[in-house]
Amino acid sequence: MSAKEAAETYRTDPAGWRLKVGEDSHGQHKWVYLPPGPQRDAWPQTVVDKYSMGLPTGLPELPKAQSAFEAAQNGLKFYRELQSEDGHFASEYGGPLFLTPGLVIAMHCYGVEMPRERKAELIRYLFNKLRPEMGWGLHTEAPPTVFGTVMNYVALRMLGVGPDDGPMTAVRAKIHELGGAAGIPTWGKVWLSVLGCYDWDGVNPTPPELWCLPDWVPFAPWRWWIHVRVVFTPISFLWASRYVGPHRPLIDELKKEIYTQPYESINWPAQRENIAPVDLYNPHHLVFKSLNRILAIYEKMPYMSCVPSLRKAGLKAAYNQIVYEDENTGYQTIGPVSKSLNMICRLAKEGRDSEACRLHLAKVDDFLWMSKDGMFMTGTNGSQLWDISFLSQAVVETGLANEAENKKMCIDMIDWLDKCQMRQNPRWHREGYRQSSKGAWPFSTPEQSYTVSDCTGEGLKATMALQSLSYTPKPVSLDRMRDAVDVMLSMQNPSGGYASYELQRGSERMEWLNAAEVFGKIMVDYLYPECSTSVLSALEHFRKIDPKYRAVEIAVCIDRVVEWIHRDQRPDGSWYGSWGVCFTYATMFALESLAIAGETHANSERVRRACAFLLSKQMADGGWGETYMSCVTGEYTHHEQSQVVMTSWSVLALIYGKSPDHEAIRRGCALIMSRQLPDGAWAQEGTEGIFNKNCAIDYPAFKHIFCIWALGRAAKYLGEA
Ligand code: LAN
């Protein structure tokens, strides 16, 4: 039976699924399954439910657009139907393939059976995403690796799939062909150790004592990039506690299935540096290897009897950080990896009946999204703020916001943005080493609680745009905008550029300590043209409406960002993108910055170089298309087919740069229009996003939002509307 056929056998009744929005907190998403009966009948499926699951939406065919502007109008006619009753646009956020297995392992530790429909849909998704090579990679577009294949094989087995059901025999053969689970990357070693299918002796030392270092130590963990910090902390707790979840006969079966030699014969300490070549993106640095050797000796010393209090203090300090994180984020934590790990730590320390475990279980569904291919754990609890911010700006800039039929949508959007701004700092602000959040906007929901520099910038821009409309309420006061400005000014780094969640807190040389072989550039928060531009443009718009507030500081900040953007330009004219694919994405942002600085094609060699770069990548059909491999390799990599999202980014970028090549822009728009579906939507193409250089992540809302924006802007630029 093929994987797709096997997937079909797990399909649940699509008519049973509903997305609940904002039930416990602002912007929250939760899929529920209703069995046939009165409750189901009383709660009809929405367009969002149907669209997310790939069911016919029943939306009408629209008259074919005759111009770019009409195409933008049609695009919005479709997209506004995806607005939820609370005002935002719910969307799936998938791609990474190492998240669901962690949650399945956590639920196993808790001894909680997920409902039948959920399990079935999780299985369906994984079977649907199985690659023809019979394995899974780090994300849905990547070739199989040991990490992806072993973790998802284990997850499927734990969800109830038999060892020889459907494609499982072939997947097991793939695992063996890749050398078996012994060579799984470190994060996989940790997950399998928690499960009892690997030995903690096979994991490099991860001492929680690091949390006892004084803050001034240059490599103290509070200086690491937030995502590394929040993943390392629970790992260090579990590693030092040698935590292993409950035993089940299945675990003995897995031990036989995923290795190429008898489990008992494996030399575990020798596995610490054994990472399968297919998984190895970022090999351990010599410094890290040497450190591990020293730490291994330290571990072997009759240490526990010499300095037991140090380990105890480390465990306590790490656990405190775990509790701060849980309590700051309403038990979601910043993202899905720490979610599952923290859940297990709280269980290990406080027991199944504790309040902490109850609260953690209550926030599991926030991470599960039901898609057309089945259910999966999402990259964050959604991309709510990010999507609505771009849409708000797109509809205001293009004038679509002033069309009568879009006014209600805009009023609901400003209401959502208003409630999404974070009004105070997190509860454990200092203790948890958190950046301030009073006035900031998050990436997803305010409950998640994390300030992101560019989300604050785009959130503020969106708010200002919607509040500039004659008919909208103005709930976000100037004082609250000033709070956002304060946050952004406090996040500028000495070199002028902006990082993602915090100031850059340590040296980039900390990359030497990167233990995650599958990701690059993760140890500190780096500086990004995308984040820098979002802040710069927000400050620029803000000072137009409040010219007196911190005027000198804002002016200096803007100048320094522009200088940093200048320095970050590559000789070929482009900028490297770290959060979207890749050179196209970052070049669009950078050209926005330069446009604000008054630099255009007519007066700036930099802009001319950037436009020439983009034009040199335009494909024969008038579109642009880049793949995530650009981010992985640092070299522009053409997609085999042009992509509407990158075409939109290029069109927007060329217009920021005031490119005189109107024909190129026109051809880009024609390509976008040619791909528009009869109902005004665009179909999903390749993945648009990336993180940590090597893992792709989807932004499915982008195809609608950026196509609408590019067509609307181009129509004005070309004098068409
Ligand atoms: C995101 C998503 C949004 C993204 C932008 C706002 C687009 C960016 O400009 C700043 C960084 C940020 C907030 C970001 C950081 C890393 C995240 C959270 C993600 C790519 C989504 C998923 C990813 C997270 C690290 C995935 C979990 C995996 C681990 C390696 C811990």
Image (tube, rainbow, N blue to C red):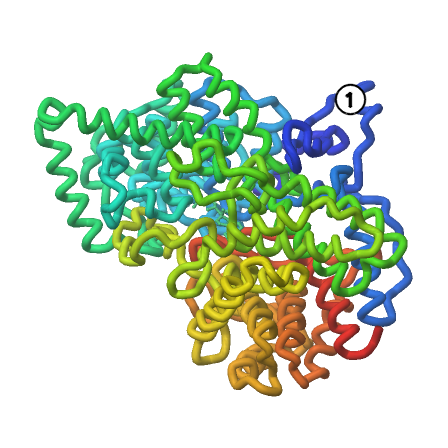
Could you tell me residue 462's position as x and y percent? 68, 54
Q: Which residue is mark 1?
A: 36
Say if residue 117 shows up in the picture: yes
> For the view shown, which residue lies furthest in the top direction?
353
In front here: 365 or 207? 207
Quadrant of the image containing the N terminus: top right
* Residue at 50% in and 74% down: 574
Locate residue 376: give its quadrant: top right
Q: Is residue 617 above or below residue 389?
A: below
Is residue 717 depicted above or below 372 in this figure?
below
On screen, residue 282 versus residue 45, left or right, reads left
Total marks in image: 1
Q: In the displayed structure, would residue 31 be above or below residue 621?
A: above
Q: Position of residue 256 (x, y in %)?
A: 34, 30
**Quarter occupied by the C terminus:** bottom right
Q: Secondary structure at mark 1?
A: loop
Q: Nearer the viewer, residue 259 or 434?
A: 434
**Residue visible at 62% across and 87% down in the picture:** 602
Ligand 1 within 8 angstroms of badge 1 C-beta = no
Of 635 and 512, nearer the camera is: 512
Is 296 located above or below residue 664 in the figure?
Answer: above
**Which percent across, then down, holds residue 620?**
65, 79
The reply to whether residue 636 is visible in this rendering is no
Q: Residue at left 52%, top 25%? A: 160
Residue type, label 1: Pro
Q: Which picture quadrant has residue 198?
A: top left
Question: Of residues 4 and 19, which is closer to you in this image?
Answer: 19
